[in-house]
């Protein structure tokens, strides 16, 4: 008698129905509005932050005409948190001529109607304070701004606008092991009181009402000009 072996029983497979060709899944479509809202919220947060940090939007001190502004400005260098302490006074507008100097000292002839307006400032500060690299902004009675020393401007000095050229004083440390207030070898200390006279390219007929001094955006100091 022969024995017949029954065939293996194979369980049927259940395959989920697939989406028709060319028809996307509804699940990711439902998530699109949420993703868009999240993206816009993040972008909306970054735009005000970047705008605030990339301009002069925070006045930290001010002074009326012929008065001193006392400045205590917190900032962070390579060694950590510290302050920049100084006093400044607007001493007047000097001569204005057609010639200007770029950042390497070459003379530049300004366009017709523009002049290089000298601005005189008086400063007081301890010799160890880092005051190189300040930026100046003259504002006229129409609200127009004319700058020198800002990092994105191509003309004018960007180091010695607020310090004497021969004795500018120390730089900020850029590495954690560097000491604050250290002068380059052979350089004499900066005096405790001094004046500077940088020039700013402006229209010949402009009437100025305010000068702003800034070392780090968005912070600035306002000096009012007599009208």
Image (cartoon, rainbow, N blue to C red):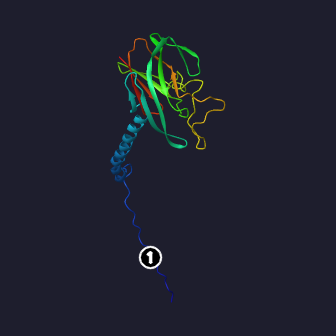
Which residue does the image show at 40% across and 38% down from the upper left?
Answer: 49
Which residue occupies 37% across, 18% down? 226
Q: Is residue 159 above or below residue 100?
A: below
Give the x, y percent position of residue 73. Answer: 45, 36
Density class for disc 1 (Cα within 10 Å; few <14, some 14-19, many ≥20) is few
How many tags in the picture? Answer: 1
Q: Which residue is mark 1?
A: 9
Which residue of the protein is positioned furthest toward the front in this rendering?
Answer: 192
Outermost residue, bottom side: 1
Query: Looking at the picture, how far across and down is residue 27, in whole percent?
Result: 35, 53
- Given residues 133 and 142, the one toward you in this image is 133
Q: Nearer the viewer, residue 102 or 48?
A: 102
Residue 140 rendering spot, x and y as whole percentages: 38, 19
Residue drawn at 50 percent across, 86 percent down: 3
Q: Quadrant of the image for the C terminus?
A: top left
Q: In this orientation, which residue lies closer to the viewer: 226 or 138?
A: 226
């Amino acid at each position: 008698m022969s024995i017949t072996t029954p065939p293996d029983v194979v369980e049927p497979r259940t395959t989920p129905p697939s989406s028709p060709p060319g028809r996307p899944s509804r699940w990711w479509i439902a998530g699109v509005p949420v993703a868009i809202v999240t993206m816009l919220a993040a972008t909306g947060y970054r735009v005000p932050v970047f705008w605030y940090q990339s301009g002069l939007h925070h006045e930290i001190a001010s002074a009326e005409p012929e008065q001193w502004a006392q400045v205590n400005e917190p900032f962070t260098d390579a060694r950590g948190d510290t302050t920049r302490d100084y006093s400044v006074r607007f001493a007047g507008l000097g001569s204005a001529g057609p010639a200007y100097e770029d950042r390497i000292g070459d003379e530049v002839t300004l366009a017709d109607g523009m002049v290089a307006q000298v601005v005189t400032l008086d400063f007081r500060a301890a010799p160890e304070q880092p005051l190189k690299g300040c930026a100046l902004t003259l504002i006229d009675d129409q609200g127009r701004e004319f700058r020198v020393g800002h990092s994105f401007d191509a003309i004018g000095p960007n180091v010695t606008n607020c310090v004497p050229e021969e004795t500018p004083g120390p730089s900020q440390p850029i590495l954690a092991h560097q000491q604050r207030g250290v002068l380059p070898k052979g350089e004499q200390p900066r005096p405790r009181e001094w004046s500077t006279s940088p020039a700013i390219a402006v229209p010949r007929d402009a009437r100025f009402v305010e000068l702003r001094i800034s070392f780090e955006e968005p912070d600035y100091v306002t000096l009012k000009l007599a009208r």
